[in-house]
């Protein structure tokens, strides 16, 4: 069952990724984070600007989850990846763990639906 509310910062990001216009929030000092954010956690700046997310990032690390929390019970096994997209690191999943990219491979962000509840998830595919 999908959730019946909208998480504006996160859902705005997923909408943008689906439209091929992914973004992150950057302060004037060059720190970057994914939404939702109102304040830069590095310098405290409240002047954050939407900045285009690179088309592809590099996988820094990955792990395969075989024993998931209840929210992802029907999705396992899945892979969780951390990828670097310029100044931001993005965590996402690959629902087909057997096809998950390795460390060093290029990935691009996509939106997938959870098998467990149908909610949208930030996911990766090979670039």
Image: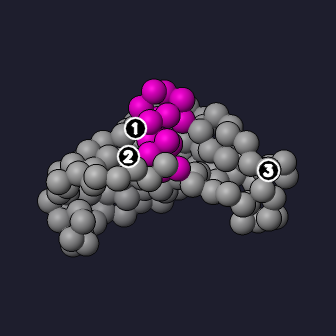
Position of residue 60 measured from the top left corner of the image (x, y, whole percent): 53, 55
The verdict on residue 35 being magenta is: no
Q: Label 2, on which residue?
A: 123
How many residues crowd mark 1 within 10 Å: few (<14), some (14–19), many (20+)?
A: many
Secondary structure, mark 3, is loop
- Cβ atoms under marks 3 and 2 closer than 8 Å: no
Give the CA separation, mark 3 to mark 2.
Answer: 28 Å
In the depicted view, which residue is nearer to us: 35 or 33?
35
Considering the image in quadrants, where does the N terminus appear?
Answer: bottom left
Residue under the image location 35 percent in, 53 percent down: 5
Indicate the quadrant where residue 57 lies.
Answer: top right
Residue under the image location 73 percent in, 42 percent down: 49
Position of residue 4 measured from the top left corner of the image (x, y, whole percent): 28, 52
Q: Label 3, on which residue?
A: 47
Q: How many marks?
A: 3
In primary-sequence order, the first of circles 2 and 1 is: 1
Position of residue 54 measured from the top left corner of the image (x, y, whole percent): 60, 35
Question: Is 45 placed left or right of 127 in the picture?
Answer: right
- Cβ atoms under marks 2 and 1 closer than 8 Å: yes
Residue under the image location 67 percent in, 57 percent down: 38
Give the CA separation, mark 2 to mark 1.
Answer: 5 Å
Position of residue 88 measured from the top left corner of the image (x, y, whole percent): 63, 51
Q: Residue furthest left?
A: 74
Q: Is residue 11 visible?
A: yes
Question: Is 121 placed left or right of 11 in the picture?
Answer: left
What's drawn in magenta, residue-wise?
A: 9-22
Question: Is 80 placed left or right of 35 in the picture?
Answer: left
């Amino acid at each position: 069952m999908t959730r019946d509310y909208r998480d504006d910062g996160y859902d705005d990001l997923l909408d943008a990724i689906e439209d091929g216009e992914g973004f992150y929030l950057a302060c004037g000092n060059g720190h970057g984070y994914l939404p939702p954010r109102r304040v830069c956690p590095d310098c405290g700046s409240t002047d954050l600007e939407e900045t285009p997310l690179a088309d592809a990032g590099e996988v820094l690390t990955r792990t395969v989850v075989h024993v998931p929390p209840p929210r992802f019970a029907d999705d396992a096994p899945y892979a969780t990846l951390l990828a670097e997209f310029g100044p931001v690191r993005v965590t996402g999943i690959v629902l087909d763990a057997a096809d998950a990219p390795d460390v060093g491979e290029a990935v691009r962000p996509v939106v997938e639906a959870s098998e467990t509840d149908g909610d949208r998830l930030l996911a990766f595919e090979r670039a």
